[in-house]
Amino acid sequence: MLKYANPTHFLALAARLIPWLGAAAALALAVGLYLTFFVAPDDYQQGASVKIMYIHVPSAWLGMMCYMVMTSAALGTLVWRHPLADAAQKAAAPLGAAFTLLCLVTGSLWGKPMWGTWWVWDARLTSVLVLFLIYLGLIGLWQTIEEPAQAARAAAILTLVGVVNIPIIKFSVDWWNTLHQPSSVFRLGGPAISPAMLWPLLVMAVAFTLLFFTLHLMEVRNEILRRRLRRLSILAASVEDSELSAEAAQ
Amino acid sequence: MKDYSFYILSAYGFAALVVGFLVVRINLDYRELKRKLARFDARETGR
């Protein structure tokens, strides 16, 4: 396992895994979409608008899961100072932002016909918006600090501070009176949702998770290559510098 | 039953746009990095 913590070995592993993971994600997505549109029934109250749930809920789970991946990587950065943990952290932020944005937009598109409004400053919606802003802050931080190791440490600290928002998102519907419905899948006493809707939802969740891991692996690979390029550029610049100084000395 | 096609199509269309954007951006980034690294390699062999 530790062997793959070496960037070169990681690149070889990623090259082998990416096509398989991508194919599995595409297959799961195709099955999930088929189940969503041709098998899952409409809701007796919400009608066909419930179809939005099959992308809204997995993107919400992914938005939070991605943050937990970043939190583990942040610990790797701060405790072991491992460059692969830095890369994993940096690579996850844009993906988390994209899935959280998808959750917010699809939620809004579901909320309008069901609640009569695109947006309310409800605890669940607001805490997810805060998550999106944290992702944007982290992306901004990575862009601002040029030295990768320094940027990784700063981002790791911000990530660890921001993790407090995850339980707030999860339990916001229990702690406060919200317009958003309470948890209907991961709750004490089992799922409250009909199996005919639960299975397509779980297949879509698996598809989104596979998609996330494929994209994350691709982003980490890019980040390793970017760092390699940066090192080579610095090395080339210093060689050119010393050659110029040698010429000037002659 | 009301017609929710606009909301459903918008939601799935936006999802396709986001996922498509991520895939294209990551792949273009990868190609660009590989091209730059290859240029470095070529320069090193030329030295």
Image: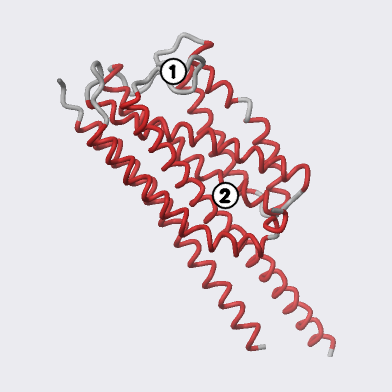
Residue A222 x %, y %: 56, 59
Q: Chain of mark 2?
A: A
- Within 10 angstroms of label 2, few (less than 14), some, or many (20 or more) residues? many
Is B42 drawn above or below residue A99 in the view shown? below
Residue drawn at point x = 31 percent, y = 29 percent: A109
Residue B32 x %, y %: 50, 67
Seen as rendered, the residue at the extreme top is: A177
Which one is in front in this view, the residue at disc 2 or the one at disc 1?
Answer: 2
Is label 1 in a helix, a strand or a loop?
A: loop
Residue drawn at point x = 69 percent, y = 66 percent: A231
Q: Which residue is mark 1?
A: A121
Is label 2 in a helix, a strand or a loop?
A: helix
| Dot 1 amino acid type | Trp
Q: Is residue A232 left or right of residue A52?
A: right
> Quick one: A3 or A73, which is closer to the camera?
A3
> Quick one: B30 or A192, which is closer to the camera?
A192
| Dot 2 amino acid type | Ala
Mark 2 to mark 1 CA distance (whole Å): 30 Å
Q: How many marks?
A: 2
Q: Is residue A164 left or right of residue A150?
A: left
Residue A22 x %, y %: 44, 54
Q: Quadrant of the C terminus of chain A?
A: bottom right
Q: Which mark is residue A91?
A: 2
